[in-house]
Image (spheres, grey):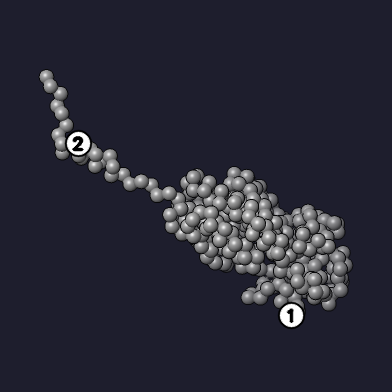
C-alpha cells in the first residue's frame, strides 16, 4: 500500500492557512490619549510628561483635558474605554476621595496602576492683611471672630476641600469655616481680591506672591518642608498633627495587558529621570517620585483605606 500524498491544492491551502494569521502590531502603533483631570500644576506636569513619553515611545501621547467633579468626569470616561493601553488617566489621590464621597460608583480597583510620577505637598496661604504669621495666631483670631473664615476650595469633596477640613479640624476651628469654590478663579487672585481669607493649594501657585510679600504662607501639610518654600514650616512643626500629600501618576482601565503596562511604566521611569523633568519640578514645586506599577498599586490601596477613614471621621463620606 502506498501512502496517499497530499495534493498540490491541499498543500497550498495548508500554506495559506499557516500564513494567514496577521502579526500582532507592536504597542504602541497609534496615539495614546492621556486624560487630564485638573488644571494648574497638574496640567503643566501632564503636558511635560506626555512630551517626554512621546519621545520615548515613538508615538504621540496626547493630553486631553476632562475636568469636573473633582476628577469624576475624567475617571468615568477612561474607565469606560477599551483596556488596550490607548486611553490612560493622569490620576491622583482623587481616585480615593471621588469614590468615598460618592462621585463615582467604582473605586481604584477599576484601573491598572502604571506608575507614580510625582508628589506635591499642599500649602496654606492667607491674605496678609490678616496679620497672621503662624497657625496658632490664625486659630486664636478665628475663634474670636463674629463671622466665618472664608476658605477657597477647588470644589466640594475635592482634595483641597478634604485637606482644608482635616487641617482646620485639628486646629479646632472647623465650626468657624465656610467653603467657597473658586469658580474660574485661582487661589492667589481670589485671596488678593478679598473674596476669600485663606486657601490650600500647591506651593508653586503661591511662590511669587509669597516672595513679594503679597500673601503669607503659614504651613505645608506634609511631614517635611518643601524646597520651593523652604522657610514655611510644616503644620506638625506648629503642633497641628496632619500629614497629607498629593501623589500623581498614571493608570489604565482594568484588564489592560501586562506587557502594555510594562511598556508605559518604563516610559514613565525614563521621563522622570530626565534633567528636563527635574528642572520643572524645581520651578513648579513638585517632587519627582517614581514608583513602579506594583509598588504604586500598593500605595493606592493603602491610601484608599486612609482617605475612606478620614472622610468618615470628618462627616464627608457618602
Res 193 label = 1
Q: Quadrant of the N terminus?
A: top left
Picture quarter containing residue 90? bottom right
- Tell me the element at label 2: helix
Q: CA distance from mark 1 to mark 2?
A: 83 Å
Residue carrying label 2: 11
- Tell me the element at label 1: loop
Res 6 label = none
Residue 168 visible in this rendered orientation of the protein: no
Picture quarter containing residue 135? bottom right
Observer-nearest residue: 23 or 295? 23
Q: Residue at x 20, y 39 (%)?
A: 12
Q: Are marks 1 and 2 in contact (CB under 8 Å)?
A: no
Q: Quadrant of the C terminus?
A: bottom right
Observer-nearest residue: 103 or 2? 2
In this view, which residue lies farthest toward the left?
A: 1
Observer-nearest residue: 205 or 148? 205
Q: How many marks?
A: 2
When the figure is inspected, residue 166 is found, relative to residue 129, above or below; the finding is above
* 90 left or right, relative to 15: right
Residue 8 visible in this rendered orientation of the protein: yes
Q: Residue at x 79, y 57 (%)?
A: 225
Give the percent coordinates (x, y) of residue 164. Answer: 74, 64
Give the percent coordinates (x, y) of residue 209. Answer: 77, 73
Q: Residue at x 23, y 38 (%)?
A: 14
Among the two numbered marks 1 and 2 on one chain, the one whose residue lies closer to the N terminus = 2
Q: Nearer the viewer, mark 1 or mark 2?
A: 2
Q: Residue at x 76, y 62 (%)?
A: 228
* 36 left or right, relative to 173: left
Give the percent coordinates (x, y) of residue 252. Answer: 52, 53
Amino acid at each position: 500500500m502506498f501512502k496517499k500524498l497530499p495534493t498540490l491544492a491541499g498543500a497550498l491551502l495548508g500554506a495559506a492557512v499557516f500564513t494567514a494569521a496577521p502579526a500582532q502590531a507592536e504597542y504602541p502603533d497609534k496615539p495614546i490619549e492621556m486624560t487630564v483631570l485638573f488644571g494648574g500644576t497638574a496640567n503643566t506636569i501632564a503636558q511635560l510628561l506626555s512630551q517626554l513619553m512621546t519621545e520615548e515611545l515613538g508615538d504621540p501621547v496626547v493630553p486631553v483635558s476632562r475636568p469636573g467633579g473633582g476628577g469624576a468626569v475624567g475617571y468615568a470616561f477612561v474607565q469606560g474605554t477599551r483596556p488596550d493601553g490607548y486611553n490612560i488617566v493622569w490620576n491622583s489621590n482623587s481616585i480615593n476621595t471621588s469614590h468615598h464621597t460618592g462621585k463615582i460608583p467604582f473605586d481604584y480597583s477599576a484601573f491598572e496602576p502604571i506608575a507614580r510620577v510625582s508628589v506635591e505637598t499642599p500649602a496654606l496661604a492667607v491674605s496678609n492683611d490678616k496679620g497672621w504669621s503662624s497657625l496658632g495666631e490664625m486659630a486664636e483670631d478665628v475663634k474670636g471672630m463674629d463671622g466665618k473664615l472664608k476658605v477657597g476650595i477647588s470644589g466640594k469633596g475635592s482634595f483641597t476641600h478634604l485637606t482644608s477640613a482635616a487641617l482646620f479640624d485639628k486646629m479646632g476651628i472647623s465650626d468657624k469655616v465656610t467653603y467657597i469654590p473658586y469658580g474660574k478663579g485661582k487661589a492667589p487672585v481670589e485671596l488678593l481680591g478679598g473674596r476669600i481669607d485663606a486657601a490650600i493649594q500647591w506651593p508653586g501657585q503661591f511662590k511669587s506672591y509669597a516672595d513679594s510679600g503679597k500673601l503669607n504662607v503659614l504651613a505645608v501639610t506634609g511631614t517635611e518642608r518643601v524646597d520651593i518654600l523652604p522657610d514655611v514650616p510644616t503644620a506638625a512643626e506648629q503642633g497641628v498633627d496632619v500629614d497629607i500629600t498629593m501623589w500623581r501618576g498614571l493608570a489604565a482601565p482594568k484588564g489592560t495587558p501586562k506587557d502594555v503596562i510594562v511598556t508605559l511604566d518604563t516610559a514613565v521611569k525614563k521621563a522622570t529621570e530626565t534633567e528636563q523633568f527635574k528642572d520643572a519640578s524645581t520651578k513648579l514645586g513638585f517632587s519627582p517620585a517614581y514608583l513602579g506599577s506594583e509598588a504604586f498599586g500598593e500605595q493606592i490601596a493603602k491610601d484608599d483605606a486612609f482617605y475612606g477613614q478620614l472622610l468618615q471621621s470628618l462627616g464627608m463620606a457618602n
